[in-house]
């Protein structure tokens, strides 16, 4: 699992039927400070009602995604919204920054 920041929504007019009624979000992997990018953006199916700007925990592996969402062509799934990251007793990152989503 990886830590990521939701930076956008994905909208499509034609899609596989298993995506009907599901939200697909654009995620940016981040370091433990919650802001510094750690790789390129990717798409992930939302299982927890996350929104743009949220710090989330993502499983980027097909088997984990299928266990959470059911059978289908899923590669990545958002499994949790992070409230805060604590390191050595200090809060190093806060989870919900919906107004301060990083620009890519």
Image (spheres, rainbow, N blue to C red):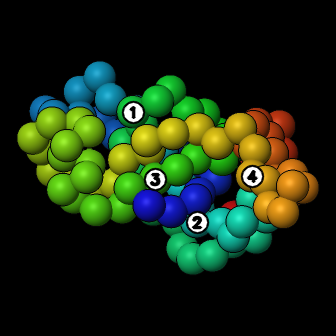
> Which quadrant does the N terminus fall into?
bottom left
Query: Which residue is identified by label 3?
Result: 58
Residue 59 visible in the snapshot = yes
> For the point 59% across and 57% down, which residue is it?
4
> Which quadrant does the C terminus fall into?
bottom right
Label 1, label 2: how many angstroms apart (C-alpha)?
Answer: 17 Å
Query: Which residue is identified by label 1?
Result: 47
Label 2, label 3: how many angstroms apart (C-alpha)?
Answer: 9 Å
Label 1, label 4: how many angstroms apart (C-alpha)?
Answer: 21 Å
Label 4, label 2: how many angstroms apart (C-alpha)?
Answer: 15 Å
Query: Which residue is identified by label 4?
Result: 85
- 31 in relation to 4, above or below: below
* Image coords of residue 23 (percent x, y): 40, 33
Q: In this view, does 99 lie to the left or right of 30?
A: right
> For the point 51% across and 39% down, which residue is it?
80
> For the point 38% across and 55% down, which residue is it?
59
């Amino acid at each position: 699992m990886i830590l990521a920041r939701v930076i956008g929504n994905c909208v499509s007019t034609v899609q596989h039927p298993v995506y009907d009624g599901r939200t697909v979000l654009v995620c940016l992997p981040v370091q433990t400070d919650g802001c510094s990018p750690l790789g390129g953006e990717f798409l992930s199916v939302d299982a927890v009602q996350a929104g743009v700007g949220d710090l989330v925990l993502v499983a980027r592996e097909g088997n984990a995604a299928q266990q959470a969402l059911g059978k289908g062509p899923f590669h990545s799934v958002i499994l949790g919204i992070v409230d805060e990251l604590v390191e050595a007793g200090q809060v190093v990152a806060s989870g919900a920054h919906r107004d301060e989503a990083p620009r890519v």
